[in-house]
Image (spheres, rainbow, N blue to C red):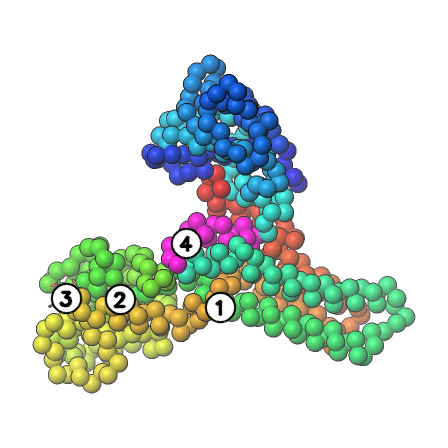
Amino acid sequence: MIPSDTIAAVATPPGTGGLAVIRVSGPRALAIADRCFQPGRPSSPLPSVAPTHTVHHGYIHSENRRIDEVLLTVLRAPRTYTREDTVEIGCHGGPLVTRQVLDTFLRAGASLAEPGEFTRRAFLNGRLDLTQAEAVVDLIHARTQLALHAAHAQLAGHLSQHIHALRDDLLLVLAHVEAHIDFPDEDIDPETGVALLRRLDSSRDLALRLTRSAPEGRLLREGARTVLLGRPNAGKSSLLNQLLGIDRAIVSPIPGTTRDTIEESANIRGLPVVFIDTAGLRDASDLIESEGIRRSHEAAQGADLVLCLLDLSAPPDPADTALFSSAPPHKTLWIGNKSDLPTHPGHDQRPDLIRISCRTGEGMETLRDRIRDQLCAGGLGSDEAALAINARHLDALERTLTSIGHTREALASGMPLDLVAVDLRAAVQAVGEIVGKTTTEDLLDRIFSTFCLGK
Ligand SMILES: Nc1nc2c(ncn2[C@@H]2O[C@H](COP(=O)(O)OP(=O)(O)OP(=O)(O)O)[C@@H](O)[C@H]2O)c(=O)[nH]1
Ligand SMILES: [Mg+2]
């Protein structure tokens, strides 16, 4: 349904700032602005008669009282974010003045926008599809270059193109099948049957390829979970602080300093990484420490990457091997810390050890490179990862794949064509949900409620 009311919201974050922006969008945006805005010069035009994409100096007033001196931008449909008439008011950035400017527009006839309502309108008016609307959120929340890159690609429609191609292919097969349902006397000739199966297979391959970018999508949106494991005093908390560039965790010479897991995000060579500092691994008699160690093991199990830290200055402990058993070998980096101290000869046997010193910073750049390489080996940073689908896309693609599978079986085993069509329609429906060709109010509510106010 195309909305008919005019909405307003503060588009900048709450709090005090130099400027704030208030956005008004809808069929009455310009008329409402006329009632709230007094041009700086009497000869200057009111918003409703001002040309599109022009900026005007003046005052927001309410009941003959001046609220603020502002710059007002007039943007006429359809060349706007929502494709509706839009007015943006740049006012002073205090919370009170911003609120008063907004209230003036609400009193003049605008209604307060829901979170994400501007983007929801952009979607309903055909300016964006659903994957692009989701990319707007990703763009706003991107914390690293690579996450930003993926969000830009999705906003530009890279993922949509693939989804549309997939849907078009399935629709073509459906058209063939439905044509034959209408003429029940004619069977699909064997040649066409083979061609249709081939087309279904290529649809399945494309859908599978897209699902493979899901792990990268998660890493880019949520960060790669990287757990620091090691015996007490190995220097895990010191390493966390080094990687973050701040003193986040308490460091002390007393073994068993860290008792709970500490999580913090960092940007490693453009990749979003969530580091998790854990309690040192040893056989603890203390109840709290044992629980901390249990959590360390648990964190390592669910990790994207595990950093196993050894103290080079201390003799290697045979218990280390057992304790580190929870680290999955293909996603583990072995690190020797305290390279500034004399190295105990027992450590020479591990050629893959990355030598660092949290005290001097030696080896930290190499470690950052190795973390990036290890995460990129999983596909992150590749062109494929630029597709980086999210959990909603994955769910819809998996349903698409199931329906394609059923269609294929039904077609190959010569089932009646109206049954084949049922499965095919389910596949078209599922793939259409991704871009918003088929939607429900519920689905839209779920997506747009994750947006911030004013977006
Ligand atoms: N010489 C030297 N000392 C270090 C280095 N890294 C850490 N230390 C010291 O080692 C001690 C233990 O460091 P932490 O970072 O607290 O070790 P941890 O692994 O977090 O220890 P727990 O929390 O007890 O498991 C502290 O006294 C640090 O100052 C290093 O590279 N060189
Ligand atoms: Mg610690």
The disc placed on residue 228 is 2
Residue labelled 3 has its Cβ within 8 Å of some atom of ligand 1: yes
- Of helix, strand and loop, which one carries label 4? loop
Is residue 383 part of the magenta span, yes or no? no
Q: Amino acid at mark 4?
A: Ala
Q: Do tag 4 and tag 3 residues touch (Cβ < 8 Å)?
A: no
Q: Which three-letter amino acid code belongs to the residue tagged 3?
A: Thr
Residue 197 in picture, x, y percent from top left:
72, 75
Label disc, if present, on residue 383 of the rendered structure: 1
- Give the labeled residue for mark 3: 360
Q: CA distance from mark 1 to mark 2?
A: 29 Å
Q: Residues within 10 Å of mark 4 (few under 14, many from 20)?
A: many
Mark in the foreground, 2 or 3: 3
Q: Nearer the viewer, residue 219 or 252?
A: 219
Q: Is mark 4 within 8 Å of ligand 2?
A: no
Provide the residue designation for mark 4. 142
Task: Name the residue located 57 percent from the left edge and 35 percent from the top edge.
Answer: 52
Q: Residue at x 60, y 27 (%)?
A: 49
Name the side, left or right, on which 359 lies relative to 453.
Answer: left
- Numbered tag placed on residue 106 in the rendering: none
- Alpha carbon of mark 1 to alpha carbon of mark 3: how far? 37 Å
